[in-house]
Image (tube, rainbow, N blue to C red):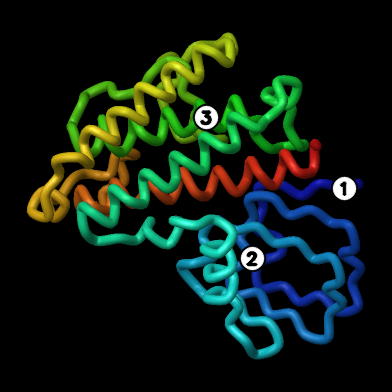
Amino acid sequence: MATHSGDRDFENATFVRTNFRGATLRSCDVSGVTMRSVDVGGLDIDSHDLFFGTLVVNGVDVVPLVNAELDRQFPGRELQSSQTPAGLRDGWVAAQAAWDTTVTNTPPELVDAHVEHEWSLAETLRHLVLATDAWLNGAIKGVEQPFHEIGQIFTGAAEMGFDMSIFRADAPEFEEILAVRAERQQQVTEFLATVTPEQLAEKRDNPWGEDDWHPTVGDCVRVILEEEWAHLRYVRRDLALLG
């Protein structure tokens, strides 16, 4: 099967009576794509940016419908956009309760198992450690080097010039992952326990070095919550397939 990677050969192209059955698109830009008179039986779309735009199916923008259904499946998820300290605290409690259920109910033999090209439960928890380090310890608290060595960096970070020497090359044991994860969870809990509306409105720098967005402290907390809910959905999806 042919693989096309890293090129723009198809930008603004038109495909007529072309067979894409069984094709896989990963980390591709399909924004603005128009599909007419197409067979979409079994089409599976997963986009972490879905809620920043529209997805029109037969003239209906389905993004609000998807969002409402995910809120139904994950009680408390709707609080990830809260603007108040109380709302963010409640959202954090709900997210951690949901994660505790998933971690507790995952059989030991599936902790390191994964669907092709996706992270395992263990790797996902390591990524959430990294997300907390970036947005709480780095962005909000201003720690110069906030990352724990077991953090799971996102794909492509090395190509972006990120210092990968920060992280351990060997995979940690699951017990160590849980211990570090618990420390980071407690840090967020303690921060939210005393944060004020005035503090939530303070500006910060983007921890990934991009200067076009200067989030508020509240924005940083909301990113942490978005990471928690998004990766919980990924893990539960994959565990269902593996189980």
At 58% across and 11% down in the image, what residue appears? 173
In the foreground, 114 or 55:
114
- The three-letter code of the residue at mark 1 reads Ala
Is the residue 172 above or below the residue 131 in the image?
above
Is the residue 78 above or below the residue 183 in the image?
below
Q: How busy is the neighbourhood of tag 1: few (under 14 within 10 Å), some, or many (20 plus)?
A: few
- The three-letter code of the residue at mark 3 reads Leu
Q: Which mark is residue 2?
A: 1
- The three-letter code of the residue at mark 2 reads Val
Task: State yes or no: discs 1 and 3 in contact (Cβ < 8 Å).
Answer: no
Using the numbered discs, state the Cα–Cα distance from disc 1 to disc 2 in whole angstroms.
19 Å
Image spot of residue 116 (x, y percent): 77, 36
Among the 4 quarters of the image, the one containing residue 123? top right
Q: How busy is the neighbourhood of tag 3: few (under 14 within 10 Å), some, or many (20 plus)?
A: many
Query: Is residue 155 toward the left or the right of residue 35 in the image?
Result: left
In the foreground, 77 or 119:
77
